[in-house]
Image: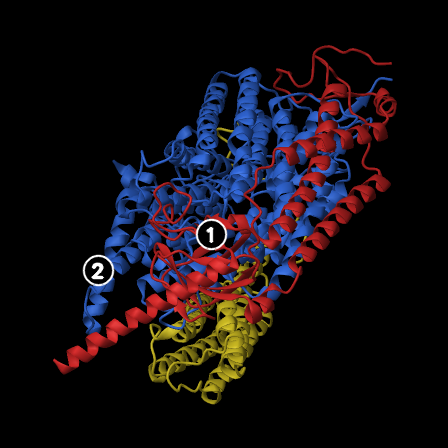
Amino acid sequence: MTAVLKPTLARCLWVAPAFAALAILITVAARSLVGMTPVLQESTLLTVAYIAGGIGFIVGIGGFDYWFTWMRGGELDPNDHSQHGAHSWGDYFKFNTDHKVIGIQYIVFTFIMFLVGGMFAEIFRSELANPGQQVVTNQQYNGLISQHGVIMIFVFMVPVFAGIGNYVIPLMIGAADMAFPRLNAVSFWLLPVAAFTLLSSFMFGSFDGGWTGYPTLSEQSGYGMTLYQLGVQLAGASSIATAVNFLVTIIAMRAPGMTLFRMPLLVWANLATSALVVAATPFIAGAQFMAMFDREMGTHFFTVAGNGDTLVYQHIFWFYSHPAVYIMILPGFGIISEVIATHARKPVFGYRAVAFSSAGIAILGFAVWAHHMFASGMEPWLRVPIMLSTLLIAIPTGIKIFSWLGTMWGGVLRMTTANLFAIGFIFTFVIGGLSGVMLAVVPFDVSITNSYFIVAHFHYVLFGGSIMTIYAGFYHWFPKVTGRMYNEVLGRWHFWITFVAMNLTFFPMHYQGLEGMPRRVADYAPQFAWSNMLISIAAFILGASTLIFVYNMIHSARHGKKAGANPWGGLTLEWMLSSPPPIFNFPATPRVIGGPYRYGEEGAKHAIVPEVEPATVETTV
Amino acid sequence: MLRVVRKRGYDAGRDTFDSRRRACSKGLAEVKTIKVLPLAIMGVVVGIVISVLLVITRTLPVQASAESSDIDNLYIFFLGFSGIIFGIVVLFLLVSVYRFRARPNDEREGDNLHGITWLEVVWTVIPFVIVVLCAIGGLMVLRSGDVEAQARTKGQQIHVLGYQFGWKYGYLNQDINLKDQQTLVLPVNEPVIFELESQDVIHSFWVPAWRMQMNATPGQVNEISTTPTKIGTYDIVCAYLCGVGHTGMNTSLPGSIIPKVRVVSKSDFDAWITQQKAAAAKAAESATAETTTGSAG
Amino acid sequence: MSAATDHSAPQIQPYRTGLRPEILGLIIFLVSEAALFGAFFMYYTNLRVLKGIPWPGDFDIPADSTSINTLILVLSSFTCEFALLSLDRRKNGAVFGWLLLTFLLGATFLGLQVHEYMIVGFTPADQSTGAIFFTLTGLHGTHVFIGLVLLLLGMIRALAGRWSPERHSGLLAISIYWHFVDIVWVILFTVVYCLPSS
């Protein structure tokens, strides 16, 4: 019973609604006092309630307890670690400051969101399987595809990498935790708030503008659209807070001896990604803020009647959303570097080139946003420079692919599931990347933009790219996180079914787009019937393959064979700790004495931790 | 000499940290026994086969505008280099997996190779050359002819109004305005400039056969031009999500009430224009007649 | 080391930068805030500079009178710096005084801005220019308000004698934030009030 008074989810159940109710009360009271109509627009009150309720949720879970104590001048004990570390499974449902706990919270929550977003896809794929309308109405369909995109991007793809990074990076750099553990926990708990905001929009007819939410359609839509705009801002806030944390942690908390060029490439990747998040995410917050004001406060940012400019939303939106796609792939590139090097027993080929290419992609990523707008009616002179910069960004990406091939060549490839996903990633990501190079060229792009060719391209780079890297990372670090080995046989089944189904689902879409099938439609011309049926069947198989993965993870976490500290023989710091690691990670500050990929070099060590046997390479020749 | 050691390594079941590895000087030798260059050439050959397959299986709408063939040729060029790059990547992937696969209980290490600078330069320069070729190809197609100016002086200027959910056309140079859902008719081999507007939300005027697409954005006029080169009827697809009726705003759907665009011979077009003008004049007459009767009555 | 019962603090890591992590974190956060303003500046520049849409009615933006606001805010940045300097010289009373002066100057700025809102003659719902004017200045004003709250907290802690030259990162953070607010205002004033639109 005391649970409802202590900082727990139970407490949120009454604190969040209380905040929401209070906010409505204050708004109505203030308006009456000043002499305005108390309730002019219900949707505005609802919006205020959602915002306050979200803050209330964070208060309820205990996110601000420490700060409230500080503000009222209360006694603070810097050695109070009661909110740190997983002592029981219940800790995963509480406000916990341990980066390992937060990492797992992120991973589990975002994966559940992945399944939810995937389920939306299965529903609309079942509508698309046959021509005509069978399963959902057009309005419901538009809601489903919009939710699919938003959930996948904002509450799965962007935060899952934050979760993996959260768990692994402090370990990799020899730190005891992240720089701001409490902020880290708040970042995580903002995600359920964002997800709730987005998903509860179904009660209001969902939002129907795609994940892009362009005006002036956004101004016509039902209340669900406001919740989309709010949810995106919440997810963005979570993302920015995490990025600040990562940047300070990576810059300031590396173990002695870990120069920039002795950092594992996952750390480089997260460094570049976090810089992107900090500089770009506020732009989508601004765009959604303005769009929300148009809806709820009667402003005219994007309306025609009020001399507004509809097109500028697209510029501001894509100024974030293009870096967003790099945010969704760069950490994945880092994971692939780790996985291939470790499972091929070889140093990453061209380490510096791969590191610099991450930075290059991050910087160039700001100069290409308008390639999403070639057919938008923007100023014509902008098209050619954007075409050139977009083509240029293919170069650092290509360098990475070739470097990974070079890493595998001459190695000793352990065909573990992690490695299978890394290899499969190269296959599918190259396809996505090549279609991207095609799309950079303006006349070609304009002939098939907004068609299924685009859908094919981004699913190849997001599923065949990011998701493959996520699976590779999950399998690679599963033994470290759980202390047990996953089932390799199930892993292989998962890989092969996913790989084949993914290609069968998304490759035909290239052809559909070229032949003239637009995107975001619930019905199509008869010529597309057989390909849509094929795609829908493959999509169902793809969805089913995820269940193999879920079963493997849950079952192996409880009954898998115990893994030692270093089942893969990795050289980076996380493999020098027990599986799972102790709560405060390292017994003493590690000292880094070499690069992270010194495989094949006799007697090589990356780092030394006092009191722990180092990972090393020995020769017997 | 490689000493086979007791079971250790990645199926280790111990609690203590234990990860000593055996480096193998044989690794370097193995790298050299497979000549990389012949493999790269084989990759190019495999890639060419893939490119040919992709080109043969390409399914594109009919080429009905002057730009269509240029854009399709650009696409074939894309398929060409894509197939080759993909072929090289896949071949190296498969050969690596086959040749460098770890055997059971394999304790060897890979070759301690951190990079080969000249190779890294090569695989930076070649993609750079390819993207430069793409840029050149794109620029060439973009600048092919000054269609817009020609359309204004000796072609057709069409006003296109997008709305939820259909298109309404006006011939700016003929002073004819069509009604809702009335067919757009154009003469073959004459440049056309479309001035796109929307009265509500963003739509997109896409004619796949012309390889032409441009948004109709509320509050501004977007222009796009083309020269239809083939007589026939072509689908118009709204390619931007515009609300509940977006799915239906596609002339290729069976039972669509939105008419496709018709390209006819010059003489047929002139006849059709005369017809439209006559109908418009008649409508104006009866309207004036009504007004006069009305004011008099 | 048993994970279940270990509550001991870990070894303190040596930090690599001269900046304390909290200050580095604040600066990075301020980069994101700058980007947030950037989004609105992007809208403003497109609307007024590139497209030349005029203000509602015959509104003439009061660059002259608002320049006084600018002066006040810039002055408050100086007083904030003096507070930091006083702390270094251990003159705790002066810290409170300078912070109070900063607070009063900031509050005056905010008050003058609110007054300006009341006399402009249009509302945020009046056209796109009305919307961006109020949003951009309002976003800044919100940041000023938060700064005032922080200054208040700083004054409370100064009175309680919590600051010292060794423990001054809180005051440093407040002053960095306040300088940020000032810099954004100078840019905003230049772009919105001073730049003639095409």
Q: Mark 1 points at which residue?
A: A236
Q: Please name the color used to draw chain C.
A: yellow
- Kind of residue at badge 1: Gly
Side of A124 where A236 appears, left or right: right
Are there few (<14), some (14-19), or many (20+) residues within 10 Å of tag 2?
some
Q: Which chain is blue?
A: A
Q: Residue A25 carries which label?
A: 2
Q: Is residue A174 visible?
A: no
Q: In this view, does B198 lie above or below B258?
A: below
The mark lying in front, picked from 2 and 1, is 1
Q: Is residue A298 visible?
A: yes
Circle 1 marks a residue in which chain?
A: A
Under tag 1, what secondary structure?
helix
Under tag 2, what secondary structure?
helix
Query: Do the residues at discs 2 and 1 belong to one chain?
Result: yes
Residue C108: x and y in percent read 41, 81
Q: Please name the color used to draw chain B.
A: red
Q: In this view, does A433 lie above or below C194?
A: above
How many numbered callouts?
A: 2
- Kind of residue at badge 2: Leu
Q: Residue A60 carries which label?
A: none
Residue C68: x and y in percent read 48, 86
